Image (tube, grey):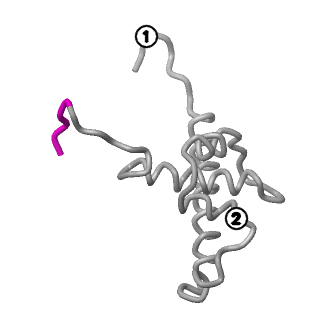
Amino acid sequence: MVRTDNDSWEITESVGATALGVAAARAAETRGEHPLISDPFAQVFLDAVGDGVWNWHSAPQLPPELIEAEPTLPLQMQAMVSYMASRTKFFDHFFLDAPVPASGRR
């Protein structure tokens, strides 16, 4: 899609919605009893955006009608949180352990 002078983009749309989903998973893992990662900024990002489905990870309980319609949703949500935490942990270590090239070399 070509950008124009009068177009608009909201954080809740397109790639922004994906970023909110990832932030929600990272915030949920950070709040966990034994978190694999810690991302104190994820919840700040979500709070700045406001209400939306990304806040389901923070809810003490999903609406019963939602669970009735999709009984495996809590398990799917936990799987997403676990995946994001594992991915984050892997890449954090990967990049922190990467050798630093000698000055002037690429």
- Main SS of the magenta part reads loop
Label 2 residue SS: loop
User: Can you tell which quarter of the image residue 86 is in?
Assistant: bottom right
Taking the spot 33% from the left edge, 42% from the top edge, the residue there is 9
Q: Which residues fall within the magenta stretch?
A: 1-5
Amino acid identity at mark 2: Ala
Residue 26 placement, left or right of 12: right
| Residue ranking furthest to the top | 104
| Residue 19 picture location, percent across and down | 48, 49
Residue at image mark 1? 104
The relative height of residue 74 versus residue 22 in the rendered view (above or below) is below
Viewer-nearest of discs 1 and 2: 2
Kindly identify which residue carries mark 2.
59
Above or below residue 19? Residue 60 is below
Find residue 35 and report its horizontal and vertical position in percent. 77, 54
Q: Residue 79 carries which label?
A: none
Viewer-closest of 49 and 15:
49
Q: How many marks?
A: 2
Classify residue 24 by image quadrant.
bottom right
The residue located at (63%, 44%) in the rendering is 47
* Magenta segment includes 95: no
Around disc 1, counting alpha carbons within 10 Å, would you say few (fewer than 14), some (14 to 19), or many (20 or more)? few
Classed neighbour count for the residue bearing mark 2: other residues with Cα under 10 Å, few (<14), some (14–19), many (≥20): few
Q: Where is residue 81 in the image (x, y as percent from the top left)?
A: 62, 62
Q: Residue 13, relative to residue 58: is it above or below?
A: above
User: As rendered, which of 31 and 5 lies closer to the eye?
Assistant: 5
